[in-house]
Amino acid sequence: MNERHPMDKLLREDRIPHIWCSGCGLGTCLTAFITAIQESGIPLEQMCVVSGIGCTGRVAGYLNLDSFHTTHGRAIPFAAGLHLANPSLKVIVISGDGDLIAIGGNHFIHSARRNLDMTVVCVNNFNYGMTGGQGGPTTPLGSKTTTTPYGNFEFPFSIPYLAAASGAPYVARWTALDTRRLSKSLGEALHKRGFSVVEIISPCPTLFNRFNKQGTGLDVLKSYQQNAVIQHGADPAKVAIERDGKIIVGKFVDIERPTFLDMVKERLGDKFEIPWEKLERKEVTVPSADE
Amino acid sequence: MESESGVLRGEHFLSGNEACAEGAIAAGCRFFAGYPITPSTEVAEHLSERLPEVGGMFIQMEDEIASMNAILGAAWGGMKTMTATSGPGFSLMMENLGLGIMTETPCVLVNVQRGGPSTGLPTLVGQGDMMQARWGSHGPYEIIAVSPSSPQEFFDLTIKAFNLSEQWRVPVLVMADEVVGHMTEKVTIPEPGTIRLTARRTPRVPPEKYLPYEPDADLVPQMAIAGHGYRMHITGLTHDRKGYPVINEEAQAELVERLVEKIRKNKHEIVEYQEEMCEDADVIVCSYGISARTSLLPIERAREEGIKVGFLKLIVVWPFPDELIDELAGHVKGFVVPEINFGQISLEVERCAHGKARVILVPHAGGGIHDPEKVLEAIRRAAA
């Protein structure tokens, strides 16, 4: 009898092989995410994963949880409905940079503003992979994509800055190389009350990295090793990513802020009757920069 | 007067929009997401006050796109859900109306129609979204839409919309208009317990045997609720019975054919209309919403003139009562279709009349209701 992989029960095995390219960072992201789920202690029946469209949007379909693959950019408002209909659910959005920050950018900032109690994982590979490598809202200046053949001339968004400025009480960024810190940070985000945002910088060797002559997936991971600098508590305004520049990673924001439902409860008092089983929040520590 | 459950009862003087909101509460709706837009805003305003009183959740989203998505998400979270909008907001909801159709998510979308295109006449009436209601989201599908002519009907048909959406697992559109939304009239609310409500068709099998898109005999599948241990996958992609994406012609045929057939084959249970004096009629005035109501006066005048006029009011507009129109066309000279657009439902009447009777559209650009003289004139022409 074959031995079962400890993550198998969280994967829809009948959907494997996945669609991701060789060298793509999404497998690592998914592994880190599953590790975080397994270590979180949150009952699996309470977890819902919502994705939008794109390569990262396919994550929901591989997870053996209640999973929703919605329309492009709309994972967050769909998740908002799910969360508010049943606040005892732990709702997690996993999607890409184009999905969450361009077409879904308005939903992202407003849900952060409201501080809806959900976790948003944004895998940022700096381009639209599913449609063949077009420029997006996080494409660094000067980078080549199929729609920026002369090099990107649009200023990109810095996701942690956007999230923090919009009111997210937890903001972290890691690369797909930081698997252990990433899964710990995801665990911390899962237990954070409020709109927690984790950005994962991830390779796209088939498209973005090839167009920009950054080599194979392995080469890109090696560049993360050289260029990533851990700076916990760094000012989110100062963590913008430049082409071939340093990548500041770490936990930038971890503050307490009343959630949307806290505010509803405060305002409505006894009128607010939605049954609300509070999730047990475990203490999880992220390794410091010294570790 | 309120019952213990917080649902209003007795007689009330309500605007159409308020009646719609109360109808939603009576139907068991406990989640509303919306965005302010004239002339539907009062639905949201009223529910922002009333939903917390009945243990429900109101949220004002950042736009209509988000509102439509939020009600889909909340439906999978186990709630009966609704949004309300008008004009451009309806256009913005079309994208995820499609997601609701594809994922077979029960929910109600109210459109208090105003004059268009574009920003058009925010405060004034129109009925120009009837074909958008039918075809506005991309791809082939069937939809259900009802159309009220008064605040009482706005109340009743909102409840009906919830019931239809639960029964057939499709978003249901309530196609009202600015005049019906803003007119204030007596609304009689039935005693609690006497309102028939359709419950969600939740799984009758345990999780290990559950297939999210395995249809029952009536072509409608059972719907699990998030958090109940069914671990389902729901996608807007073409999917198989497991709910998994399958990108090929066969899967598309199986799924989309069922989405269409579940409405077409069950049409006899969905279609509803009001038919008066049609037995001996030479002319039938066929309309819906406010235009059905404003047709009553010209019909009365025409009868006084000795013209045998019947009245056919479409209560459920989509699916369209093809067979009924076909049958009536066999023994009338013509149909008169007043509507506040330049020909939408009139085209359907024409299609179903199969050339057996003439169809006269009484158009109106919007911003007001029909001049009874114009409808009367059309009746005279149809009778000639």
Image: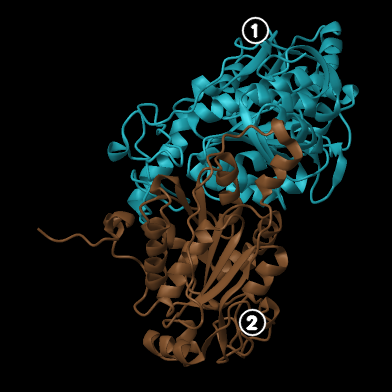
Chain colours: A brown, B cyan
Q: For the residue marked with disc 1, what is the amino acid? A: Glu
Q: Secondary structure at mark 1?
A: loop
The answer to whether B195 appears left or right of A93 in the picture is right
Instruction: Name the one closer to the observer, B293 or A263.
Output: A263
Quarter placement of the N terminus of chain B: top right
Confirm or deny contact between disc 2 and disc 1 (CB under 8 A): no
Q: Residues within 10 Å of mark 2 (few under 14, many from 20)?
A: some
Residue A255, quarter of picture: bottom right
Looking at the image, is mark 2 or mark 1 nearer the viewer?
A: 2
Does B17 sit left or right of B77 as displayed?
A: right
Residue occupying the far left of the picture: A1
Across and down, in percent, residue A104 comes to: 62, 62
Provide the residue designation for mark 2. Answer: A239
Residue assigned mark 1: B279
Residue A143, image x, y percentages: 58, 88
Determine whether the residue tagged by mark 2 lies in a helix, strand or loop. Answer: loop
Determine if residue B374 is in view: yes
At 38% from the left edge and 62% from the top edge, which residue is drawn? A34
- Asked if residue B360 is positioned above or below residue B225 in the image, the reply reads above
Compared to B74, does A144 lie above or below?
A: below
Side of A281 where B82 appears, left or right: right
The image position of residue B339, as x and y in percent, is: 77, 31
Question: Which chain is disc 2 placed on?
Answer: A
Observer able to see residue B141? no
Residue under mark 1: which chain is it in? B
Image disc number at residue B329: none
Q: From the viewer's side, name the closer residue of B209 and A261.
A: A261
Q: Is residue B163 above or below residue A170?
A: above
Q: Image quadrant of residue B159? A: top right
Q: Amino acid at mark 2?
A: Val
